[in-house]
Image (cartoon, rainbow, N blue to C red):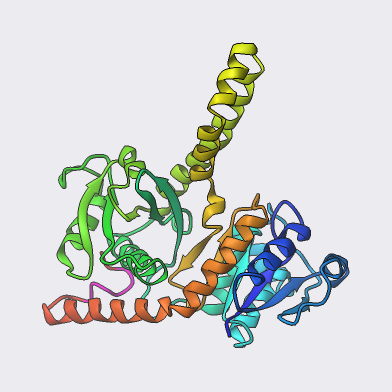
Amino acid sequence: MTRVAVDAMGGDRGPETIVQGLMDALSTREFEALLVGDEAVIGPVLDRYGPHPRVELIHAPHVIGSHEAPSAAVRRKRDSSIGLGLGLQREKKADAFVSAGNTGAVMAFSLLTLGRLKGVSRPAVAAFFPTKKGFSLVLDVGANSDCKALNLLQFAIMGSIYLSYSFNKARPEVALLSMGEEETKGNDLTLAAHDLLRSTELLNFVGNIEGSRILDGVADVVVCDGFVGNAILKFGESIVEYVSETIRESVSSGLKAKLGALMLKSSFQTLVKRMSYEEYGGAPLLGIDGVSFICHGKSKARAIRSAIISTCDYVEERVNEHIREQLAQLSSQDTSRGGTGLCQEGQG
């Protein structure tokens, strides 16, 4: 049975939300949970639900704050809920880790504790974007502000494999985010990445797309560097709050506005739901030699539940094993063509 370590201290809403999301996930999925955090804080919350045969509490004396520098946290708080939670995975006591805590700290501890998958030059954070056709997986959205073409090629492969096995998408369509659809447009990075993406048969590459086309759902996987990805992710998240706030202000402006809002209430709710990150819960850190899912700091119980279930899917579908195989195949293809070690760190 899959064992998931859950950071009980992460997130803006406190342990109550984490525990509720965990209990909701346990009611619909068979897995075991290691709930990591301050026993004095978590214990009373767990007591309200009563003992659960598939939940074990692991005491962690320290918490990493949302604004703490990851480098300092790695040095000083190895016994934090994040540090101990990922340590359980290294010790083979857990198969995966889920946290709504400090994103930078989760990434730093994941790399330090678990390392990278063989063949991966840099891990990437993947995030789901709602589209007219369902969703697109965008990566990287924050792990790497500066990238090389090789990094983007590997992001594309990892994202494609993740969708193939965790979401049963056959031959996901992969696109490169650029300033124009023409292959001659873009900066040095996108021009070089386009050539690599086009040259491999391991991907179903459909070419460049502009940012305005992401929500059209023209590709299942969209790759970019972490600086650009994080910027569009934060902008996208702000749209949900902006739309909700605008509607509330309009409703308070008069009777006609209230009647109109009432008639469109169902449509507004559907729109907000489609734009919400809670549908998928968490973003996997692809490329580490383990499983680490990062949730939004504002996650509610539903998002935590979704993230834990997605984590179980990732483990049970052996996504990392398939990534290793594909990268090994990519390296083999490059060698057979007389390449110069394209798939090694520092190339591209």
Q: Looking at the image, which residue sits at the far left?
A: 337
**Could you tell me which quadrant the N terminus lies in?**
bottom right
Asked whether residue 342 is drawn in magenta, I would say yes
On the image, which quarter does residue 328 sit in?
Answer: bottom left
Residue 67 vs 254, above or below: the answer is below
Residue located at (43% from left, 47% from top): 130
On the image, which quarter does residue 181 sit in?
Answer: top left
Residue 223 vs 27, above or below: the answer is above
On the image, which quarter does residue 123 sit in?
Answer: bottom left
Residue 333 appears in the picture as rendered: yes
Residue 191 appears in the picture as rendered: no
Asked whether residue 158 is drawn in magenta, I would say no
49 left or right, relative to 17: right
**Could you tell me which quadrant the C terminus lies in?**
bottom left
At which x and y percent is residue 71?
62, 63
Magenta residues: mostly which secondary structure? Answer: loop
Residue located at (21% from left, 62% from top): 204
Residue located at (32% from left, 55% from top): 220
Magenta range is 341-346
Residue 41 vs 255, above or below: the answer is below
At which x and y percent is residue 190?
26, 51
Residue 187 vs 325, above or below: the answer is above
62 left or right, relative to 232: right
